[in-house]
Image (cartoon, helix red, strand yellow):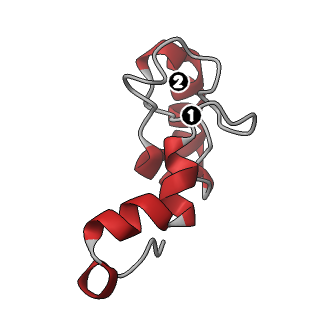
Amino acid sequence: IKVGNVLRDGFINVWRNSEVMKMLRDRDASDYACNSCSFRYICGGCRARAYAYFGDLKAPDPGCILKKEDWEKLKLKEALIER
């Protein structure tokens, strides 16, 4: 995922103006999986893990301790795939 060129544009400019970074900072967006979680401003979920599992930065974090049931389903699915 490209967010910008910090060597050319500088970190602050990329942080403030990159569409990807803006999207990641908007934790109230309706399509953000954690938008209703009371911990979204503290945690926000692991966006890298969400992307690795679902190909979507706004997807739920399968490692979220508040979503243990979802994590168990993913582990079962992976175990079935390995067989």
**Callout 2, which amino acid?**
Glu
The secondary structure type at the circle numbered 1 is loop
Q: Residue 55's spot in the image, x, y percent?
A: 60, 58
Image check: 34 left or right of 4? Answer: right
- Towards the viewer: 82 or 11: 11
Asked if residue 83 can be seen in this view, the reply is no
- Towards the viewer: 69 or 27: 27
Residue drawn at 75 percent across, 34 percent down: 30
The residue under label 1 is: 27
Asked if residue 18 can be seen in this view, the reply is yes
Q: Residue 75's spot in the image, x, y percent?
A: 50, 34
Image check: 26 left or right of 44? Answer: right
The secondary structure type at the circle numbered 2 is helix
Image check: 38 left or right of 63? Answer: right
**Callout 1, which amino acid?**
Arg
Q: How many residues crowd around disc 2 within 10 Å: few (fewer than 14), some, or many (20 or more)?
A: few
The residue under label 2 is: 72
Q: Residue 13's spot in the image, x, y percent?
A: 37, 69
- Towards the viewer: 70 or 31: 31
| Residue 60: quarter of image | top right
Residue drawn at 45 percent across, 16 percent down: 39
Q: Is residue 83 above or below residue 3?
A: above
Which of the two marks, 2 or 1, is nearer to us in this view? 1
